[in-house]
Image (cartoon, helix red, strand yellow):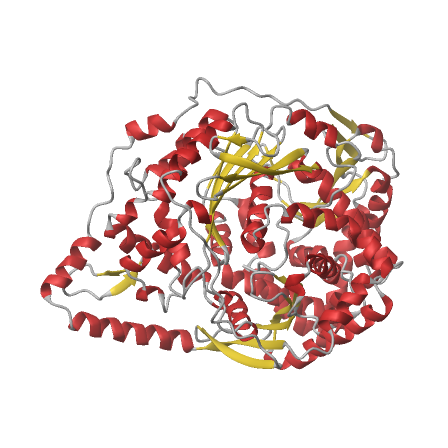
Amino acid sequence: MKKMLPFLLGIWLLAAAVSPAAAAESSAALPETGDVVEGFEVMEIRDFPLMGAQAIHLEHQKTGAKMVYIANEDTNRVFMLAFNTRPIDNTGLPHVFEHATINGSDKYPSTTLWFSATYQTYNTFMNAFTTDAMTAYPVASLSEAQLLKLADLYTDDCFHPLLMKDESLFRREAWRYRLEDMEGELTMEGTVYSEMLGALDLERQAMLNANRAAFPGSSLGYEYGGDPDFIPDMTWEALKNYHDTYYHPSNCTAYLYGQFEDYTAFLALLNAEFSRFEKQEFSEDTSAYTPITEPVVESYGFPMEAGSSTDNASEIWYYVVCPGMRDNPEEEEIMDQLCNMLGAAASPLMQNLDKVLPYGSFSVGREMAAPDDAVGFNASNVNPEDAELFVETVNSSLREIAENGFSQDLVDAEMASLFLSTALVGESAQAGINIVESISYLNALTGNPFRYLESVEALEKIDEWNQQGLLAGAITDWLLDKETTALVTTYPEPGKQEEKQEALKAKLAEIKAGMSEEELQAIIDFTNAPADDTDNTEMLASLKAVTVQSLPEEIREYAVTEEDGEDGVRRIDVEANVDGIGQVALTFDASGLPQELLHYFSLYTNLLGDMDTSAHSWEELQVLISRYLYSADIRLAIPKVEKKFIPMMRAAWIAADADLEAGYNLVSELLFDTDFSDTARLSDRISSMKSAMRTSFNSTPYNVSIYRAMGVSDPAARYWAYCNGVEYYAFLEQTEALLASEPETVLAGLQAVQEYFRSHVQGFTAGFCGNPESIAVNR
């Protein structure tokens, strides 16, 4: 996962967020700075208007453990424990312990209880996750009493896991040998081992390669999830030592979020556990890190199956390391906003890259988890020979922006997008989980529990900083003409995966040959051992605070109106709870399209916004889409009505009231006035689509397989798979070739689809969710 940007949510602090008055009202019974509550001292309190909250930082007096309490009116409450867990090697110790932790504890001695609780208690979220800087255990519930019980389960799992006493949990979660019988083949498996065999793909390995080149000797160069080549080096003793080292209150931050009648009960729970420990000092060991002082250029192969395509299948990373930036938080904030602007689809950087490498996809962000700050530019779905052109384009684009700054229309578009993100942040079903995870990650990196709040506040300064020249200045000061750069290419090597598998098979055969009969029998016994059948009934009952009978009933009613206009358009309007913003969904009946046009239908929707229209170039459209079509989505939709499916083209977006008319007009322009005659641009777009689909097929092949399997009995799934799966990919390949020999055939197909929808404007459905007073616009 690429974890460079500091925001897991793109949000902005504006007056449109909940007012400080609302936050104060929800915090009436909260403590004040200096108060001591259940062994925790209140260190600082800040307003957090974005969430209508007050953010309270507490510290456990005995151990120094931190607590961050986001107090607001959200009844979907969150509790989370987070530990700073940098990887110390490639065996995946943080990841394995994350899995092992939820396999029972001293108080709850069952390896299956956590999973039973996931489905049989009144929670809205239960999980655990590992990053390059921390391991976290979040849980959420609409019941405060239920959350307290699950907090007890999580706390005991983290500090007193069964893993410390039961080696079989290590073998199950990390790695183990598998042998069915004496004549069978010795293999390896394990929850994390098997997971990482699929997770460590070329993209993830490419980022690791870049991290090792840019930050030699740092923990960022280790695969925190575990490299399957190294996971078998892990021992049970090493895993237990890892727990003893890192799972300590002094290395822990607890989080509460939401509306609590008695938040002190959670502090009392933690105080009872934390008080068993003595305070320790924790800090990351960076002694092995050797900063680069001159440009580094590296290239690595990645083993792939024989027959794998190598066209547009490589990853290029270009890091500019910024020594000294870590000492200036304001410079970091400016760089973060610069990266936000550089990464916008309409930015000069992204548009220039799109022109010279049209088959690629690109991203940019500040890498914060390294010993030194750095800005990373990434190109996916490209070729090794593109590396020099990629760097040249990045640097020339940076020089252009350093000289001219960002255009005001681009800044306005980004600011409008951020406004909508802000106003809608509370609409997320898991707003609390998202916010807590964002706060915890930056806290783990910086030791500042309010760093996320400060980053949110910085978002409102983009326009000001651009006008002052600070964004352009950051390019000159930190990114241009630097010696501390790393250019790293990772490319596929077809056939190497089979060689690797054969080598492992031979190694395991040799290991088996060297084992005694007793050792082999022990492996056979473990392989064939029955699953854990611990009776969880009593423990599960003790964890339930809400029964089916006591579940609160909450029925939300919305005002819905329907109207069939004289123009043939059916309108459905729904009143929503967010003032000043609406969501629009237009659906056009596509059932009249013949089969020979279905793939052209998919291509047509995929091209909208990436080709010129009669009024705007594709570059101009990128700015307009960012400005007026937030979260735009134009695609095939297949709703079912009375057991029958109706293929539709769905065009949906979110907009502020003042922008609704502009949004409608822009969508109309995209749908009916897109010009497909630029065959060179069209060919480039198809090449890019192929690259993206191939990456998707390789990373998540089950998605395609599931729809094809469902299609055997479900016509809607069969229709979707035909329009979006392997048949569509084959169509793109054929179309790319056809453009070179018979471009008029391709254009005719696209124009036929466009004309079909143009002729079916009457008879479509216009859906709107928002303030009914805001819909008086010309559709």
Residue 70 coordinates in the image, percent (x, y): 60, 36
Compare residues 596 and 422 and report the one nearer the observer: 422
Residue at image location 74% in from the left, 75% down from the top:
480
Residue sitting nearer the eye, 734 or 309: 309
In which quadrant is the N terminus drawn?
A: bottom right
Name the residue located 78 percent from the left edge and 59 percent from the top edge: 751
Give the image location of residue 721, x and y in percent. 55, 53
Q: Outermost residue, left direction?
A: 517
Q: Position of residue 701 (x, y in %)?
A: 48, 59
Residue 174 visible in the picture: no
Nearest to the observer: residue 652 or residue 496: 496
| Residue 12 placement (x, y as % from top left) | 73, 45
Q: As drawn, is 319 to the left or to the right of 286?
A: right
Q: Nearer the viewer, residue 1 or 749?
A: 1
Name the side, left or right, on which 377 lies relative to 305: right
Question: Taking 296 as reference, is 397 above or below it?
Answer: above
Count of labels in the image: 0
Quadrant of the frame with the C terminus: top right
Left/right placement of residue 710 relative to residue 108 reads right
Examine the rendering and report whether any part of residue 47 can be seen: yes
Residue drawn where x is 71% and y is 56% of the image: 333
Determine the image quadrant of residue 471: bottom right
Q: Quadrant of residue 319?
A: bottom right
Q: Is residue 442 above or below residue 299?
A: above
